[in-house]
Amino acid sequence: MSDTQGSKPENDGKAVRGYGGGGVSTVISVDDVVKEVQKIAETAPTVEELAALANNDPYLKIDSLRAGYGKMEILHDFHLQVGKGQSLCLIGPNGAGKSTILHSIFGFTNIFSGSITTGGAEATDITAMGPSQKLSTAGIAYILQDKSVFPDMTVEENLWMGGYLKDKPQEAKEAAERVFDKYSRLAERRKHPARVLSGGERRLLEISRALVMQPDVLLVDEPSIGLEPRFIDMVFEILDDLQNTEGKTILMVEQNAKKGLEFADIGYVLVDGQLALAGRGSELLENPEVGRLFLGG
């Protein structure tokens, strides 16, 4: 998203606003987007409305969370609910706290109050668990932004690294073989150093490495970042397969708001560490305010 403040002259009659690109005459600055979303947030969704979006059967749930880094609070009384096998996309201005939600779920922030639970009806409180326990015990995997592969290791060795918490190295190797059976693109390059992979192949490797621990929940941070359009489509097809074929629950931060909302069952709009708007992804795509502020008109 542009950090341009104020407006700028038209270019051949076209300029962009919000997150997108398309045919309007002014650029909305980051500050203006925040102010306008804050107005929308005055009628923020209730906990009951969030539960309805999760079909009143949440698998991953956040209640009244206050969290941040050091002593700085980023998330303020934040709520979230997503059902088993659903996908949820977080959008909002830069600095709204989107990635902090993923970090808090996985154990990378300080939790000041509130709770995070997973497991549906037999919910387990995972608020105080560390990242290793979240992955090995709670079945939550965090897929980092781009450039998290080990470039000098082979594709195969990168996958083995995804199973570092398994009791036996052989278990990681067996899990890697299951990945190779599923993705021939990686199998063909198993002995190649990861640095030779294309951008889309690296993203596939990052996702696949997270699958080695067989998680139930995938936290995906900016899956389209740095990718060419053809690879973006490929990555979202992979995520769609993981959700709809393997039943993974996916919680995603995506700066390409249109792509994220097209993919997700549920969309949340954040501002200043708080929830401003929530709805079905398809509904938010049709929402004129969301379109104007985040989708380019």
Image: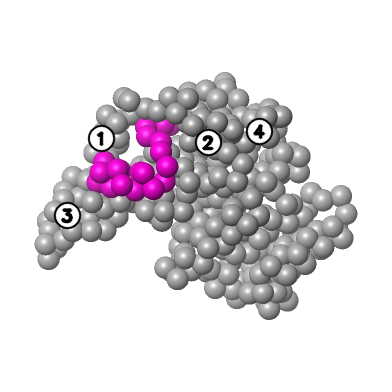
CA gap, disc 2 and disc 1: 27 Å
What secondary structure is marked by label 1?
A: helix
Q: Foreground: 259 or 165?
A: 259
Residues under numbered marks 1 and 3 in contact, where contact means CB atoms less than 8 Å apart? no
Looking at the image, is mark 4 or mark 2 earlier in the sequence? 2
**Circle 2 sits on which residue?**
54
The amino acid type, in three-letter code, at marker 3 is Val
Q: What residue did someone put label 4 on?
A: 120
Which callout, 2 or 1, points to the residue nearer the camera? 2
Q: Which residue is mark 3?
A: 24
Q: Could you tell me how far apart the alpha carbons at marks 1 and 3 are, in whole angstroms?
A: 17 Å
The x and y percentages for residue 221 are 52, 50
Confirm whether residue 287 shows in the render.
yes
Between label 4 and label 3, give the one nearer the viewer.
4
Which x, y percent locates residue 259?
41, 56
- Alpha carbon separation for disc pair 4 and 2: 11 Å
Q: Which residues are magenta?
A: 271-293
Reading the chain from its start, which is encountered first: label 1 or label 4? 1
Q: What percent of the width, then of the height, locates residue 142?
A: 62, 48
Residue placed furthest toward the top: 113
Among numbered discs 3 and 2, the one appearing first in the sequence: 3
Residue 73 appears left or right of 141: left
Q: Name the amino acid, label 4.
A: Gly
Query: Is the residue marked by circle 2 packed among few (<14), some (14-19), or many (20+) residues within 10 Å?
Result: many
Of labels 1 and 3, earlier in sequence is: 3
Work out whether residue 8 can be spotted. no
| Residue 273 is covered by the magenta coloring | yes
Residue, disc 1 = 36
